[in-house]
């Protein structure tokens, strides 16, 4: 992954709305929206997979 791809994924992380993560409770969704990077780093594997699924959906093939 190059720097452009990394930054694009990081930007995508900040553009996910809580409702797009039905695996998370309402409180967890609010925590995620408040601080997506920190939430991702400390989340369970299942939640991290759900978040990353949304990040990857936003990637455009070159």
Image: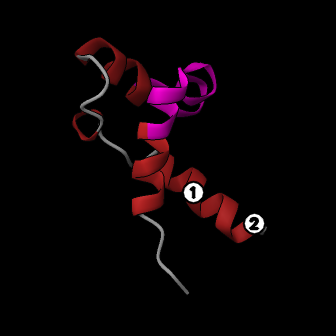
Q: Is residue 18 left or right of residue 9?
A: left
Q: Which residue is mark 1?
A: 9
Q: Which residue is mark 2?
A: 1
Dot placed on the residue nearer the N-terminal end, 2 or 1: 2
- Up/down of 54 relative to 48, above or below: below
- Up/down of 43 relative to 5, above or below: above
In the image, what residue occupies the spot 51% across and 81% down? 61
Disc 2 secondary structure class: loop
Distance CA(mark 2)–CA(mark 1): 10 Å
- Up/down of 10 relative to 24, above or below: below
Depth check, front residue: 6 or 22 = 22
The image quadrant that residue 42 belongs to is top right
The question of residue 21 being in magenta is answered with: no
Q: Which residues are magenta?
A: 34-49
* Mark 2: few/some/many CA within 10 Å (<14, 14-19, 20+): few
Q: Nearer the viewer, mark 2 or mark 1?
A: 2
In the image, what residue occupies the spot 41% across and 38% down? 50
The question of residue 48 being in magenta is answered with: yes
State the image coordinates of residue 31 (x, y, percent, origin top left).
Answer: 41, 18
Q: Is residue 7 left or right of residue 36?
A: right
């Amino acid at each position: 992954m190059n720097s452009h791809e990394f930054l694009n994924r990081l930007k995508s992380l900040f553009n996910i709305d809580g409702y797009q993560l039905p695996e998370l409770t309402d409180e967890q969704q609010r925590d995620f929206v408040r601080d997506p990077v920190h939430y991702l780093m400390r989340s369970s594997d299942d939640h991290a997979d759900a978040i990353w699924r949304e990040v990857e959906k936003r990637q455009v093939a070159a």
